[in-house]
Image (cartoon, rainbow, N blue to C red):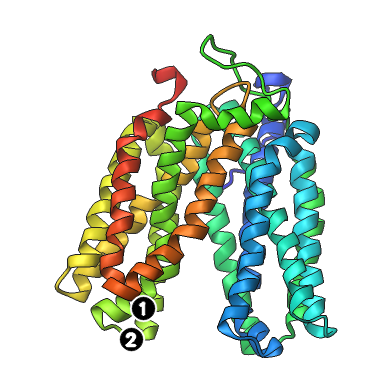
Amino acid sequence: MSEPMASPSLDTRTYDGGLTRYDVVRWRNALFIVFALSGLSIASWLGRIPSIRDLLHASTLEMGFLAGGISVGSIAGVTLSSHVIARFGARRTSLYALMLVAFGLVFAGLSTALGGGFWAILVGMAVFGYGNGTLDVAMNVSGAAAERVLGRTVMPLFHASFSLGTMVGAALGAGAELIDLPVSVHVSVIAVVVAVVGVIVTRWYQSEELGHAVREDDGPASTGWRSRLAIWTTPGTLLIGLIVLGMATAEGSANDWLALAMVDGHDVSNVAGTTILFVFLTAMTVARIAGSPLIDKYGRVPMLRVTAASAVVGLLLVILAPTVWLAIVGVVFWGFGAALGFPVGLSAAADDSRNAAARVSAVATIGYVAFLVLPPVIGFLGEHFGLLNALFVVLVLIVAAGLASGAAREPARR
């Protein structure tokens, strides 16, 4: 994914702000690592949920409250992040957020070993969620700037790195469960890795203001919190938010319900259902890696329309296919289709040269709402109409995202 760092003596090209090739590649590689750290931290905690439940002797409702702590913290972090970035910049915000992620993990992890109990873990998870929500916006703002400076699409690759981080975290969590490694030890080690590596690589960030050319249609700069909140009223931001809403729902609904929908709707085993979810995640990761050069060649809007169509076809196959194998083909199309909407939407949100952080924050908040709120709605509908039928709601939102895709058009193509 990453090319070797170029030496300034071998590559004398300069980029915006007088950056050398070495500076830009190091910045890009730092973002790959930060995205992976975010995915690693989340999956490491989620992979230990069975052990945490057993340690607490917690009910399903209580575990739901713990998950809610992460959700509330994440939404707070995403919502407030534009103000933090405006004050400290994306580099320092990313560093502070990584420290909060590490602290939240250690606090919650040690609480499982020292008898801190449910409420202590809930506090740790809220801090963890706030850190990850803030980090999400800061790293995407910096990623969009790196993309502009490089002059080619890399945002889907950053999100692929996040996906790879979740895979590593899930594998480590499974291994820790297998050898009965205490949760406190496991997550504390992960926290140290996140903190130490974060301190090192965030030093390689460059200014998120680089790569912008001020255009006549840009709005006024977001110099105060009121103007940053006003971003929520602009049609362009809301349309990009609709793209992210639809495609984040396509991704989040699969993460939460695909395995169970295949078990209940297509009569596969639990193991097969989990394996089919892995097929979806693999398809999505591959599409994010392959999607970057295709976006550069064909543009954001055509690729968003193609991927939305792929998601629609795939989801229809999953819902209506008469055989399991045809449904699995649908899962692959669904994974391909869900891959690009979120990262491309965040890239488009950062196009405005004066309001990038506020717009990315607004769009990311909409995406988080999709990830956190709509899956329970699908569960409620599934209880009454069946999970496969409940997925028609996702289908409608994907179609809406495809219809709104013109809002993500690159400035140079307008």
Instruction: Identify the residue shown where x is 36% and y is 58%.
Output: 335
Placement of 76 over or under 171, stated as above or below: above
Task: State if disc 1 and disc 2 touch (CB < 8 Å).
Answer: yes
Which residue does the numbered mark 1 point to in the structure image?
273
* Between 102 and 154, the one nearer to me in the picture: 102
Picture coordinates of residue 412, whole percent (x, y)? 44, 18
Secondary structure under the numbered disc 1 in the rendered image: helix
- Asked if residue 333 can be seen in this view, the reply is no
Helix, strand, or loop for circle 2? loop
Between the residue at mark 2 and the residue at mark 1, the CA separation in whole angstroms equals 6 Å
Q: Does 157 sit left or right of 386 as displayed?
A: right
Image coordinates of residue 41 in percent, x first then y, are 67, 64
Using the image as rendered, state which of residue 288 and residue 66 is in the foreground.
Answer: 66
Left or right of 297 in this view: 102? right
Residue with the mark numbered 2: 269
Q: Mark 2: which amino acid?
A: Ser
Residue ID at (27%, 69%)? 388
